[in-house]
Image: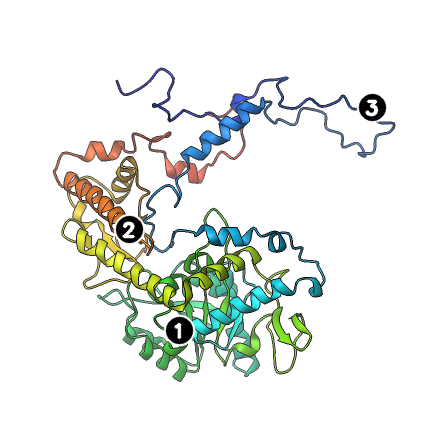
Amino acid sequence: MTETFSGNRGLQLEEPLIFEMGSDGRCGVDYPQPEAPLEDRLGGLRRAAAIGLPNLAEPQVVRHYTRLSQKNYGIDSGFYPLGSCTMKHNPRLSEKMARLPGLADLHPFQPQATVQGALEVIDTLAHWLKELTGMPAVAMSPAAGAHGEWCGMMAIRAAHEDKGQGHRRRVLVPESAHGTNPATAAMCGFSVDPVPANERGRVDLAALKAKLGPDVAAVMLTNPNTCGLFEDQILEIAEAVHAAGAYFYCDGANYNAIVGRVKPADLGIDAMHINLHKTFSTPHGGGGPGAGPTVLSAALAPYAPVPYVVHDGKGFRLVEQAEGDARPFGRVKGFHGQFGVFIRALAYVLSMGGDGLRQSATDAVLNANYLMARLKDVLTPSFDGPCMHECLFDDRFLKDSGISTLDFAKALIDEGFHPMTMYFPLVVHGALLMEPTESESKETLDQFVRVVRGLAEKAKSGNAAEDFKAAPRFTPRRRLDETLAARTPVLKWKRGGNS
C-alpha cells in the first residue's frame, strides 16, 4: 500500500491552504463589539463585504505554520549543492550580533551623533573589503549583486563621460556570464556584444581582442566563471582592455572561491561587486536579504556614489554631497545599504580573520574538486582539468536512457537532497552544476556521492526511465507542470474556484 486514507505519510502531514481550513465564526481572540461610529469618516469607502481572511482558532494557526516549516528545505536541514549560489552555513554568532538591541533597534532617521557605532561598523567593514580586494574605494550602499553591478557600470559610464569618451557605448560580455550582466549593461544605456568561450570553457581571448575598439566601454567578466573555472588568461584580458581605453568590470558572485588568496586589484580589475550574502555568509534567497558593495579602482574611485562614511576629527559622518575631487555619479539607495547584512558580514570576517577567509576559499575549492574526482567516472564533466568552487557536468551520461537532467534532479529529491543547479550555465547542454561550499564535511559529501553514483548507475541500466519520470514520489506534492505554472500562475485563492 503506497497511499493512506488521510493523505498523510507517517508524521509528514498533508497540509491544505490556510483558506481551506477556515470556518465562519471561529477566532482565536475575543474582540469587544465596537461602538457605532458617530459619523462615517471613510468617504464612502467603507467595506461592504467580508475581507476574505480565514477564520481559525489559535491551535490551527500554530499547527499550520509549524507543519509548513517542516516542509521547508534549507541549509539548516541538509546539504545544499546549488551551483553559483553559495548556500553556505550561516554562523549563529553572526545572527546573534545582528540582533543586538543597540544595532537592531536603530532607525535610519536618527541623528548621526547617535549612531556613531553603526557608522563605525560600516567603515570597518569597508576597510576589510578594500584590504581583501586591494581596491582604494568601495561603495557600500548597493542592495544586492545586480544592484552592485549597476553601480560599477554607472561609475564606468560616468568616468568615460567625464573624460569626453561618452561615445563608448559597447560592452563585451562572455556568453557564459550571469544573466544580470547583459541586463545591467543594457540598463546603463550600453549595447551588449557577446564574447564566445573556447573549448576549455574560458573566454576566447582572440575573439575578445578582435571585438575591442574605440567604442568599447568595458568588459564584464566573472572570475571564477560560471562554469566553475578560473580565467587563467585574466591578466592578458585586463591588459588588452586597458590598452583599448576601456574598463574591466568583474562579477564578484564567485569571489568566495578566491577571497584571501588573490586580490582582484592585482588582476587588473577596475570594479567588482561583492555579494556579502554569499562570500561573507548571510542567509539569502527568496528575494533577500542581500548586499552588494562595489569596490572601485583608483581610476573609478572619484565617481563612487553618495553617501559614504568618512572619519575625521568630528567622528564618523556620512558624506551626502560631493567633497574635494569626488565626482559621484549619483545615489543608488535611499539609505546607506543593508545594515543588518553589514553586521553579519563583519562578524563573519572578524571571527574568521584573514587566515580563516583564505582557508574557507581553499576548502570550498577542495570540496568541489573532491566531488569532481568521485563522480567523473559515472557523470560526464563538461571540461577537463580541476575546477574551482563548483564542478560542472552535462547530460551526456544520460544519452539514450530516456532520462533528462530534470528527471535526474527530481529523483535526487526522493533521496533527501536538494538538487544541484540544472540547465545552467546555458552554454552547456543539460548542465548539472554542483557547489558544495567549504563548511560541508567529507561524510556529507560521501553520502551525496553515494546517492548520485547510485542514481547514475540506475539511469544507465536501460529500464529505469519510468521510475525517474515518476519522481519525486515522497514529497507533499508530486511532479508539477512547471511550464503551465509559469505561464498561468494562480496568484489568488477563490472559494471553490481553485483546483
Amino acid type indicated by mark 1: Pro
Classify mark 2: helix, strand or loop.
loop
First reached walking from the N terminus: tag 2 or tag 1: 1
Question: Position of 420 compared to 178: left or right?
Answer: left
Circle 1 residues within 10 Å: few <14, some 14–19, many ≥20: many
1 over 201 or under it: above or below: above
Any part of residue 146 in sight: no
**Residue that label 3 marks:** 36
Q: Residue at x 29, y 52 (%)?
A: 434
Q: Residues within 10 Å of mark 2 (few under 14, many from 20)?
A: few
Using the numbered discs, state the Cα–Cα distance from disc 2 to disc 1 in whole angstroms. 29 Å
Is residue 492 visible to the viewer in this orientation of the structure? Answer: yes
Q: How many marks?
A: 3
Query: If you read the primary sequence from the N terminus, does the residue marked by circle 3 or circle 2 appear first?
Result: 3
The residue identified by callout 2 is: 441
**Foreground disc of the pair 3, 2:** 2
Q: Position of residue 186 (x, y in %)?
A: 48, 64
Reply above or below: 182 against 480: below
Front in this rendered view, residue 119 or 22: 119
**Which residue is farthest left?**
461
